[in-house]
Amino acid sequence: MLLDKIYYIVNSLEGDYAYLIKEDDASGERKCVARALLPPEIAEGSRLVYEMMEYSMV
């Protein structure tokens, strides 16, 4: 599970935090992540992948 890729969509950007939604999550529960941990070029609607404890753009 640790090495699995998890795909997210940036739902919203609020100050120093981004709210992400899993692509395959029907409930739409948002995950709050500090923007410092994300690529600087993200925008609302960006697609990210979480792999090896890092976020990157897809």
Image: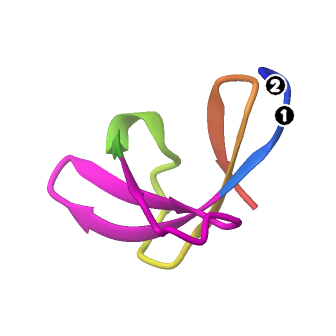
Q: Is residue 47 left or right of residue 14?
A: right
Mark 1 and mark 2 residues within 8 Å of each other at the beta carbon: yes
What secondary structure do most residues of the magenta stretch adopt? strand
Residue at 64 percent across and 31 percent down: it is 54
Residue placed under numbered mark 2 in the picture: 1
**Mark-to-mark CA distance, 1 and 2:** 5 Å
Residue at x 48% of width, y 44% of height: 38
Is residue 12 highlighted in magenta? yes
Which residue is farthest left?
Answer: 15
Q: Is residue 51 magenta?
A: no
Q: Residue furthest bottom?
A: 45
> From the viewer's perspective, is residue 32 above or below residue 12?
above
In the image, 14: left or right of 22?
A: left
At x 76%, y 61%, the residue is 58
Q: Position of residue 44 (x, y in %)?
A: 42, 76
Task: Judge by depth and name the residue closer to the eye, 20 or 45.
Answer: 20
Quadrant for the N terminus in the image: top right
Q: Is residue 39 above or below residue 3?
A: below
Picture coordinates of residue 40, whole percent (x, y):
45, 52
Question: What residue type is disc 1 on?
Answer: Asp
Q: Residues within 10 Å of mark 2 (few under 14, many from 20)?
A: few
Instruction: Say left or right for 57 vs 37.
Output: right
Which region is colored magenta?
8-31
Q: Nearer the viewer, residue 43 or 11?
A: 11
Mark 1 is surrounded, within 10 Å at the Cα level, by few (under 14), some (14 to 19) or many (20 or more) other residues, namely few
Q: In the picture, residue 46 is in which quadrant?
A: bottom right
Q: Amino acid at mark 2?
A: Met
Which residue is identified by label 1?
Answer: 4
In front of the other: 1 or 11: 1
* Callout 1 secondary element: loop
> Which x, y percent locates residue 24?
70, 66
